[in-house]
Amino acid sequence: MSEARRVLIVTHTGRTEALAATQKTCEQLVASGIIPVMTNAELADARAYSAQQLLVEDSMLRVEELGVDCAAEDIELVMVLGGDGTILKAAEIVREEQTPLMGINLGHVGFLAESERDGLSDAVQRVVAKDYLVKERLTLDVSVIVDGVVVYRTWALNEATIEKSARERMMEVVVEVDSRPLSSFGCDGIVMATPTGSTAYAFSAGGPVVWPSVEALLLVPLSAHALFARPMVISPNSLLAVEVLRRSSGHGVLWCDGRRTRELPPGARVEVRRSTKSVRLARLRQGPFTDRLVKKFALPVHGWRGPDGARDEVS
């Protein structure tokens, strides 16, 4: 491989605005001497869109194909154009290489994204200048065990969720922490999340918001029929386990980040522990997580004066 810099573009090709953003990003990267790279399917969609625009100078012809023209380990950075779902897809693509991800939010909340759509050009310029920070996020290793045999392994950045497969029936489970039983109950499911996932499914289920700098695991029961079934924050070095009891009337389903799934028969056991591999997020600014919460959730902070009577309000 040459010494040329390569940036992987991962986008939501089902949306026209994402394809337009992809075209713009590739144009800027090529003009700056950086080679854009895309997966086969997304590159085909992006080139089809470009052809429809009747562009004379088509920078999409300069884009390399991941795995054919360019190996994953030769990627310097991943620019993700879309919402949090697209970022999760990108994290899956570069899981082994742990390449940094920079998200440009084209979705709704976009909690994992670093910049909004109106900051795209500036973000590309910062990439060209290598003017960004890289922060590591804790991830989960997930195993499914049936009759004492590991039948499935996967991972999660946000959460591993065990849900009932039949809407009309409860799922009976027993929960363990560090190989010790904690409680058993009927429920709709269990969410086991990272701090990154605390503002996703776990938050919607009533779990706490955990700052990314806090190393912890979360366990949040879903509609549990039990007195002791509150959200819990647990040591990051603990082993969490949920077993679908054989007396359950139906199967369960494991979902990891809403992308990877596995059916859980009665008796199946799901073990979750901290992974040795992190996800690395590229950041353009070093602002406090508090400000991100305020911005993404549009929290009311008007009237705040600050510790010394400061009049600046959170933007």
Image (cartoon, helix red, strand yellow):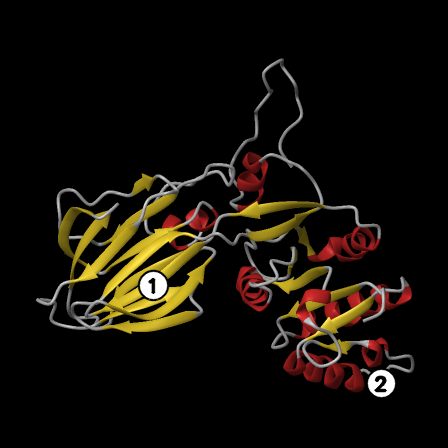
Question: Callout 2: few (<14), some (14-19), or many (20+) C-alpha neighbours within 10 Å?
Answer: few
Residue 164: x and y in percent read 23, 67
Question: Callout 1: few (<14), some (14-19), or many (20+) C-alpha neighbours within 10 Å?
Answer: some
Label 1 to label 2: alpha-carbon separation: 49 Å
Residue found 78% across the figure and 70% down from its top: 36
Q: Eyeballing the image, is 187 above or below 20?
A: above
Position of residue 61 in the picture relative to residue 196 (left or right): right
Residue bearing mark 1 = 143
Residue found 67% across the figure and 54% down from its top: 116
Query: Between 250 and 239, which is closer to the camera in this rendering?
Result: 239
Q: How many marks?
A: 2
Residue bearing mark 2 = 54
Position of residue 296 in the picture relative to residue 133 (left or right): left
Q: SS of the residue at dot 2?
A: loop
Which of the 4 image quarters holds residue 47? bottom right
Which comes before the other along the chain, label 1 or label 2? 2
Of the 4 image quadrants, the one containing the N terminus is bottom right
Query: Between 51 and 272, which is closer to the camera in this rendering?
Result: 272
Which of the 4 image quarters holds residue 33? bottom right
- Looking at the rendered structure, the kind of residue marked 2 is Leu
Which of the 4 image quarters holds residue 162? bottom left
Residue 234: x and y in percent read 33, 40
Residue 109: x and y in percent read 54, 54
Of the 4 image quadrants, the one containing the C terminus is top right
